Each structure stands twice: as C-alpha cells, then as structure tokens.
Image (cartoon, rainbow, N blue to C red):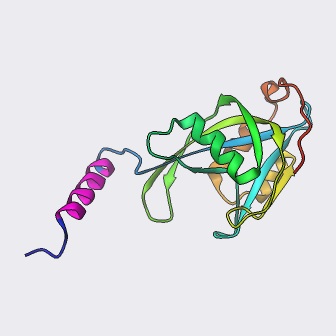
Amino acid sequence: MSDISPLACESMRTEWIAGRRGRPQAKAAGGVVVRGPSGSEEVAVVHRPRYDDWSLPKGKLKRWEPWKRAALREVEEETGLRCEALQELAPARYRDRKGRRKLVRFWLMRPMDGSFSPSSEVDELRWMAPADAVELLDYDHDRDLVRSLAGADRVGDAPEREVTG
C-alpha cells in the first residue's frame, strides 16, 4: 500500500506530464521600468532581502490572471509605481530555485505615478543607468533584458512623468 495520497499522485503526475512536454511549471510576469529622456534613461532595480539579490520587479501570476495584468500588478506591489506597459519584451526561461521550469514574461514600462516604500519583500529600489544596472543585477536573464534596451528609441518616446522613489 502506498503512503502517497491519490491527490498527491495526481499532482505529481500532472507536474511530470507538464515537465515532459516542456511546459513551464511556474509562471511569472514583470517589468523593465524605465524613466528619463531618451539617451539618459534609468532602469528600476529592486533588492529582495529574502534572497539577498538584485533583480527586475516580477512575481507569480494569480490563477487565471492575464500575463500583462500580472506584470503591472507585480511591478506596483514591489515598487509602489503605477506604470503603463509600452511593449512586451523577450521572455526569460530558466529553472527556479526548486528546479521547476519557469517562464517570465516582461514588459517595457514607464512609471505614471507612485513612490517606493520598503517592505519585507523588497527593501530597496535603485534607479540606475542601464550599464550600471547590468553590473548590479544578479541574473543573466535580467541583464540580457536591460542590455537589449541600449539605444532603443522606443524607450524615450513616451512622455516624461514626475515619479519619486
């Protein structure tokens, strides 16, 4: 007789099938939040004390939540900034700390209003030149996204708004 419940067996079977088909087992969305005029943009980078890392703001989707809505919600939760999503960027695919396949979809974002307040999830936000952000970020996929913005005219095309943080 097995010590594993039928529900646990079904969950493991579902996870195994998802893994076998290459589907992500964890889904997240986030933003590359940029402020400033074209040619002198700054990127928002956040510090997560739980992992003691520097990353772009992102987080897990809620059940049935659309990707873009999740990205805007997570950025606001982590940074305090209400943003507009300008365009979708290249997704990141990797294995998370638990070994699960993870897919993170990112949007280029421009802050509209709000201000940062430290929390237990994110204790620091830094606005940095893209080259400096690349040096500080802990993950290759985040660094690649920031590098991809270099010289992108679309970043400075949105109107400038006053944002603190």
Quarter of image, res 149: top right
Residue drawn at (50%, 39%) of the image: 65
Magenta region, residue range: 6-19
Please give left or right for residue 144 compared with residue 81 in the image: left
Quarter of image, res 2: bottom left
Q: Is residue 154 magenta?
A: no
Q: Position of residue 122 (x, y in %)?
A: 72, 61
Residue 43 or residue 93, whichever sits in front? 43
Q: Position of residue 159 (x, y in %)?
A: 87, 25
Please give left or right for residue 10 compared with residue 56 in the image: left
Quarter of image, res 48: bottom right
Question: Relative to residue 38, is residue 78 depicted above or below?
Answer: below
Q: Is residue 10 magenta?
A: yes
Residue drawn at (91%, 33%) of the image: 39
Q: Position of residue 105 (x, y in %)?
A: 57, 40
Residue 85 or residue 56, whichever sits in front? 85
Residue 15 or residue 84, whichever sits in front? 84
Residue drawn at (84%, 55%) of the image: 126
Q: Residue furthest left?
A: 1
Q: Is residue 143 visible?
A: no
- Tell me which secondary structure the magenta stretch mostly adopts: helix
Residue drawn at (71%, 35%) of the image: 108
Q: Is residue 51 visible?
A: yes
Q: How many marks?
A: 0
Q: Position of residue 1 (x, y in %)?
A: 7, 76
Please give left or right for residue 43 compared with residue 3 in the image: right
